[in-house]
Image: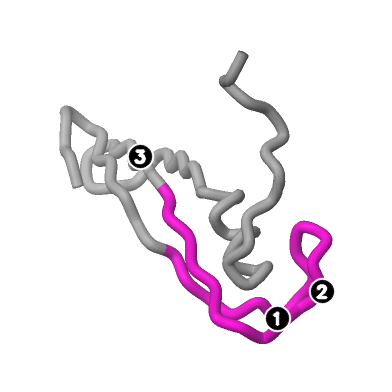
Amino acid sequence: MVEEGNQVSGKLRFHGFHRRPLFGRAPTGRRVWWYGALIFTFDGPKVRGLWVLGDIHGRISRMNGGQTEEAEFSTRT
């Protein structure tokens, strides 16, 4: 975690079970996990804002049993 002024950011590892359809994939019941980055904004002791960015492609890959999908775009020329 990193604190600067009234903001705190960090990297988290989320986890859960794939119990409902998600991203077009039928439920598998398997445990899935993914990384996320977040930024909390505080107003005194209260959280006034939260921004989260999750690794959706990593999550989808794990829901597929670890197989990766074709990239939608590439930085290669």
Callout 3, which amino acid? Ile
Q: Nearer the viewer, residue 69 or 35?
A: 69
SS for callout 1: loop
The reply, left or right, for residue 64 in relation to residue 10 is: right
The amino acid type of the residue labelled 1 equals Arg
Q: Position of residue 28 (x, y in %)?
A: 72, 82
Which class describes the residues within 10 Å of circle 1: few (<14), some (14-19), or many (20+)?
few
Point 19% across, 47% down: residue: 1
Image mark for residue 26: 2
In the displayed structure image, the side of residue 50 where residue 25 appears, left or right:
right
Q: Which residue is mark 3?
A: 39
Q: Are marks 3 and 2 in contact (CB under 8 Å)?
A: no
When the figure is inspected, residue 54 is found, relative to residue 39, above or below; the finding is below
Q: Earlier in the sequence, mark 3 or mark 2?
A: 2
What range of the chain is rendered magenta? Answer: 14-36
The amino acid beneath tag 2 is Ala
Q: Identify the mark at residue 19; answer none if there is no mark.
A: 1
Mark 3 or 2: the one toward you: 2
